[in-house]
Image: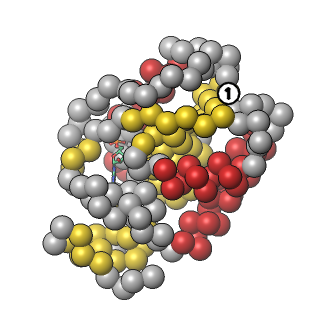
Amino acid sequence: MEKEITINGLTFVPYISRDEIREQVSRVAGEIRRDLSGCEPVFLCVLNGSFIFAADLIREVGIDDCHVCFVRYSSYEGMNSSGKIKQLIGLTEELEGKDVVIVEDIVDTGLTASNLMDDLRRRRPRSLRFATLLHKPECTKTGFIPDYVAFSIHPRFIVGYGLDLDGKARNLPDIYVIKEETEDR
Ligand code: IMP
């Protein structure tokens, strides 16, 4: 893991290693497998940030009858939430009567997640669950609590393992945090 990286002039330092990620993704996958074994779950992955988490998680869950689809629902520009929730796009899968697991990279204010849950409930799935790689519970504006969380973290801006700063750093195998904010998780 690199000691420090610079993205758009900002310095980031290592925060969560690929080994820790693998361990927690495996734990979450086990929880999902336990809750949904015998079902044909639909994993609804929220692009772009969840693509790496989703790929690792879904393979680790190991339910061969599952379906995988992708939607987009971005509300972020740079490092601050714009607070604007945009329209859900790309959903073509029929969800009525299905067991749906939303796969997200991070829940910050929870606005995106709450909106998405409301949107999807209207499509009458049999069950609807929410899995996220990261959760910043102190940032919530909605009280939304995800069903599955790999890591609960303090309000810090992070990148890597799918998460970006202005589209950059999604490729990093480890998670990095902005340098000024490196106290305990
Ligand atoms: P929310 O609607 O405020 O919960 O924002 C969720 C979205 O904000 C995520 O899907 C990310 O795209 C983005 N986001 C929130 N925090 C971070 C971060 O620390 N790094 C990168 N993106 C973030």
- Name which residue lies at 16% across and 72% down: 9
40 displayed left or right of 72: right
Instruction: List the single residue furthest toward the right.
Output: 38
> Which of the pair 79/145 is nearer the observer?
79
Q: Identify the residue at horizontal 78%, vertical 31% (top origin).
A: 39
Q: Amino acid at mark 1?
A: Asp
| 145 in relation to 12, above or below | above
Asked whether, in this view, residue 96 is left or right of residue 40, the answer is left
Image position, residue 98 (x, y; %): 67, 22
Number of marks: 1
* Residue name at image x 49 percent, y 50 percent: 51
Residue 185 place in picture, x, y as percent: 43, 68
Query: Badge 1: few (under 14), some or many (20 or more) residues near its Cα, within 10 Å?
Result: some
Which residue is label 1 attached to?
99
* Residue appearing at x 20%, y 71% in the figure: 10
Whether 114 is drawn above or below 15: the answer is above
- Specify whether residue 181 is in view: no
Residue 152 image point, x, y percent: 49, 57
